[in-house]
Image: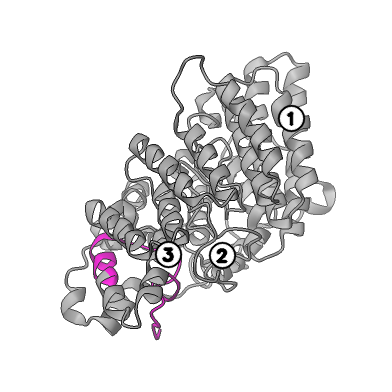
Amino acid sequence: MSNKISEYFANDPPSFFDELASKPKSKDLPAEGGASSNNSSSTSGTNMMSSTFTGFFQPPEYVETPETGEDSIKVTDEVRNLWELPRENEAGKLIMPGIHLQNDLADPISVAVTQHLGEAELSHRKILRVDDVTQDERGLRTLIHAGCYRTAVNLTGRLLTIYGQGYGRSGQPAKHSPHSLQLWFTRLALLAKLGEFELLNTEAEPFGQLRSADVFYDFYPEMYSGKSGSIACFSFRLLLAELPIYLGKPHIALDRLSELHVTSREIKEHYSNQRNKTAEEFWQRRCERVLHSIINCGLMMKKFSMIDDIMEGTLLKRSNLSKEDQRSLYSAWGRIYLQIGDIFGAEQKFAVSRRLREINSSPDLRDLVDKGLIAVAKNDFPEAYVIFQKALHLDTGNTMILNNMGVCLLYAGKLKDAINLYERAINLNPQKSLNESLLVNLSTLYELESNNSKAKKYNLLRLINRYKPDLNISIEICLKLQTIN
């Protein structure tokens, strides 16, 4: 199974602004150190190279982008799978995972619809179920592509049971293969996306940091004659290193990510010494992926001086960095400065980013978002609204920009206009605009507008029922409707 299955683990970027509602500190979202997220993103809010990077902490996701995706560089399996073999004190430990759910994950949208709207409305819910797809990798891809993430988790449970790693098998010896480990990576990444952090932590625990001998080809000479290196993909290692972020323990994640970066850099230097430029560039990209995760961790911990050191001393020092990548990094750096209230510092970074744009070219999405954020920081909400409106013309339906426009209208005293903006966006494109952060904002606006907001929230629930296979935060948070499980 290709690592590219992870390209589907994304949805639209969050609002730059804090959610209007108070942010949860429960299992529904990880503890966070800035704005809330609906995601992290594609054009990924977690990806600093994205024009919609917010500058806030975002729960990580596994989205390969054309700009930074290592898969754009073709290398041999030997290069791709190279990793340090377990130390002597780790070599005897084996990884023995198992599914911890006896039954399938339930559909919380169906539960909420049944309780609040009744069985008749539930009949309009048309989503793919496990038995509607082929019981293999192709079926898994179909479910993920359709946004049916809970159903995809349930299918991974069936497929891992075939490998002898199903319910009740934790602690039992098992053989690992590229396919079984990719299934585990997919399952755990989906659980992270869905906010099922307790289950994620429990099922990920046996893997540790993938240091055991039985996740290396060398452990199975009879099966993989002459093949060496890690069976587990690099993204799996990165996910496990970031896992403590979801549990509100970023300091542990930072230690793990730093160790991952050291190993990745040593492998890059190994290929540099061999004068293998392609392999060196491949591992350079992996080093940068880890550094982006470290910066994300630093945002949560408010370690801004560490972020400055990484940006200036490492990421921007690469000799073959394109002008567009430099632009992206300076823009991201400026947005981080806004989070600490340094408007002057942010303007300086944005100015560098603008100068790197093609001469005589018109302002693009990145420039307009940067300019709009500066206007927000200066409390000039009417001006910010006009700028975001221009940005929306370049990317119609972008929910991050729509969210910002709605909040600008609210702060300008135009509550009804903000509601109309969100409702119009949902009516024009319900699949895209029924976005978690937009739903939270709109539900809060309904409560500010009237004491009789429940009927309007029920209308939103009807739309969610018909257009959204899954949400990555609960109905209680999205719509502020209490649901009894």
Write the start and end of the magenta stretch as one range. 460-485
Q: What's the residue type where badge 3 is placed? A: Asn
- Which color mode does the image show? one colour
Asked if labels 1 and 3 touch by Cβ distance under 8 angstroms, the answer is no
In front of the other: 478 or 187: 478
Give yes or no for residue 463 being in the magenta stretch.
yes
| Image location of residue 436, percent across then percent down | 41, 61
Circle 2: element type: helix
Residue type highlighted by circle 2: Leu
Between 6 and 373, the one lying in front of the other is: 373
Q: Mark 1 points at which residue?
A: 267
Q: Where is residue 363 in the image (x, y as percent from the top left)?
A: 46, 27
Percent of width and height locating residue 428: 23, 51
Mark 1 secondary-structure assignment? helix
Residue at 22% of width from left, 67% of height from top? Answer: 125
Query: Is the C terminus in the top left, top right, bottom left or bottom right quadrant?
Result: bottom left
Residue 21 shown left or right of residue 445 in the figure: right
**CB under 8 Å between discs 3 and 2:** no
Quadrant of res 97: bottom right
Q: In this view, does 52 lie above or below 14?
A: above
The residue under label 3 is 441
Query: Which is more N-terminal, label 1 or label 2?
Result: 2
> What is the crowding at mark 3: few (fewer than 14 residues within 10 Å), some, or many (at least 20)?
many
Looking at the rendered structure, the kind of residue marked 1 is: Ile
Look at 60% across and 72% down and name the residue there. 25
Kindly indicate the quadrant of the structure image that contains residue 216.
Answer: top right
CA separation in Å, label 3 and label 2: 28 Å
Q: Which of marks 3 and 2 is nearer the N terminus?
A: 2
In this rendering, which labeled residue sits more in front, label 3 or label 1? Answer: 3
Query: Residue at image x 42%, y 64%?
Result: 441
Q: Name the residue under label 2.
A: 200
Q: Is residue 460 above or below residue 1?
A: below
